[in-house]
Image (cartoon, rainbow, N blue to C red):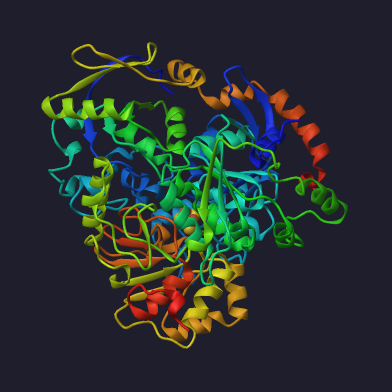
Amino acid sequence: MEKFTPFRGIVAGIDRPNIDTDAIIPKQYLKSIKRSGFGVNLFDDWRYLDPGHPGVDNAQRRLNPEFVLNRSPFRHAQILLARRNFACGSSREHAVWALMDFGFRVVIAPSFADIFYNNSFKNGLLPIALGEVLVDQLFAELEQQQDYQLGIDLEKQVVSNAAGIEMPFEIEEFRKYCLQNGLDDIGLTMQHTDAIRSFEQQYYEKLPWLVQ
Amino acid sequence: MAAQTLYDKIWAMHEVRRDDDGTRLLYIDRHLVHEVTSPQAFEGLAKANRPIWRKQSIVAVPDHNVPTIGLEQGITDPVSRLQVETLDQNCDKYALVEFKMGDVRQGIVHIIGPEQGATLPGMTVVCGDSHTSTHGAFAALAFGIGTSEVEHVLATQCLIQKKSKNMRVTIDGAVAEGITAKDIVLKIIGEIGIAGGTGHTIEFAGEAITSLSMEGRMTVCNMTIEAGARAGLIACDQTTIDYIEGRPFAPSGENWNKALDYWQSLHSDDEAVFDREIHIDGTSIEPQVTWGTSPEMVIAIGDVIPDPAAEADAVKAGGMQNALDYMGLKANTACDQISLDKIFIGSCTNSRIEDLRAAARVVKGRKVANTIKLAMVVPGSGLVKQQAESEGLDKIFIEAGFEWREPGCSMCLAMNDDRLEPGERCASTSNRNFEGRQGKGGRTHLVSPAMAAAAAVFGHFVDVRELN
Ligand code: SF4
């Protein structure tokens, strides 16, 4: 996993609550056995006018000109701004892979669904929860400014706008540490194999039917 | 010791270690695996040269891509086929238990876990699928995980977790005749909202819950995730124990008695304190129908579709308007005026034997309305199908004009060939009515099996309690 460093990036906004994982990456693309290549099908139903399937050449499909990610400069957006309960629905990590493959590194919303929130960190995507009022304000600023950018500083835990106003956000220490150092959870847990073994020993003594 | 909730008890039993910041390493008993969310995890494991920590914890099955007709031809879509073959290869390579296509035990992962007795009280159960919450019906802490976490469990038998908050939803009083588990859970989601349970584990309690069969309890826990909570729980009681006894993976002999002793402790203590408590009057629950593109957009059969103009919260009103536009519906339309094109009875929410019996009771001696283009029943597993056939349910459905299919996820998410065409409207017993869920442009109304069956017969929604 890549280390998460401070950056300023273009913001794309999708002004809807409860954007679900089926919208982020429709099921037909979950048939892939790979982790990459989902970016072209991010928000597929909203992004293309023609239906899509794995194997179809996406370059041949008509783009929906209204959809934000089809408009310049948002094709190069690195920060997604959305409303409450972002990415509710399924556990598909493909949602995170698709967002990252497109180029997003941060999603800002008032709240996130639990599984998606968890999945994000495993891949180096930073979900930032800001209050509803702040998110309202960011949407308003975004509407007024072409090429609207925000700065993200994980170390300081702040989002900063063009005027230099800093909006602090919360993140658990452990997750921050892993993101900053690009650490893989499995490697970290493998440091505790002795603890797992001794846990198992006492556990299966107490619950012998589980090893029947 | 301080009074504990059921969640606290199961959690405490599985804590391997605790970090200063509150992060815990949680031990996992049962790992259910299917073809969609596992290939990248197996690949990661092999790349890092890591072995599987505890093979016995795994039960695997292909379900999402499996066709429901023409099984002799195998899977015709090459992309789907490759995914299922990849699962088969991984399971063969590591010698894991897998119920392959063609095995009578094959079916939807959340149906077969309990059916095989692989889901037991007090366990931690995970699967790369959000509806893993289903297994909470057995007083097991069960939740969906992403693919990175699937790999993490394969490699370490553990997950890095933070404890969630405790929430209890109590349904007071008994529900009326004709009201099913699906109506109860849709009502709950309508009340607390699709993010109402975020950050919590929900325990379901009260007379209306304890009097449900295991099938009904699974339906309720299945949809916990639609209320935003990763896990739902119901205390272990005699109904739980009776269901498990004698199943292939269940303990037997002396172990059975030892297990019973432990399982009987799997309920919240009387004095336990929950971070949030919700009470819902069970006696007032009516048959539920969703009208929008999120499970919280739900009304009773006797109601009209709500009007965004009357909604004070602007973000919510916008969401409602989007939903009405997508669904091709108008505010204030009576629920029983909604006509359907297709009927789907199936999915991990409602494809167990009891669901099929309930639907068959409605359908018996009646015909599917000629305005319905397709009505299909997809049993949750090969064993459910076998049982239904031994009771003659297949004949009832077929005579009425339903298609009787092979087990799988089918039109719940339309990864195989079963799907809605743009604009088609479906009464579905599944769990998600998101845009495009059952096919691009498809319109889904979530209902109970009995309500779906009645809609098939009349071509529009009707109050199933008024049929006799
Ligand atoms: S039946 Fe539907 S919800 Fe259940 S596991 Fe299959 S696709 Fe998911």
Q: Position of residue B131 (x, y in %)?
A: 51, 50
User: Which residue, as the protein is rendered here, is positioned at the far bottom?
Assistant: B365
Q: Position of residue B394 (x, y in %)?
A: 53, 80
Query: Residue drawn at (43%, 37%), measured in percent from left and top?
Result: A116
Q: How many marks?
A: 0
Q: Position of residue B285 (x, y in %)?
A: 47, 62
The answer to whether B418 is drawn above or below residue A146 in the figure is below
Q: Is residue B225 left or right of residue A194?
A: left
Query: Residue drawn at (22%, 61%), measured in percent from left and top?
Result: B328
Q: Position of residue B298 (x, y in %)?
A: 37, 57
Q: Is residue B404 left or right of residue B4?
A: left
The answer to whether A146 is drawn above or below residue B305 in the figure is above
The quarter of the rendered structure image containing the N terminus of chain B is top right
User: Which residue, as the protein is rendered here, is positioned at the far right?
Assistant: B254
Say whether residue B403 is visible: no
Along the line of sight, the residue nearer the viewer: B260 or B420: B260
In the figure, residue A208 lies in which quadrant?
top right
Query: Residue drawn at (35%, 72%), measured in percent from left and top?
Result: B461
Query: Residue drawn at (53%, 74%), measured in percent from left and top?
Result: B358
The answer to whether B250 is drawn above or below residue B265 in the figure is below
In the figure, residue B10 lies in which quadrant?
top right
Say whether residue A141 is visible: yes
Along the line of sight, the residue nearer the viewer: A119 or B289: B289
Q: Is residue A83 left or right of residue B224?
A: left
Along the line of sight, the residue nearer the viewer: B384 or B90: B384
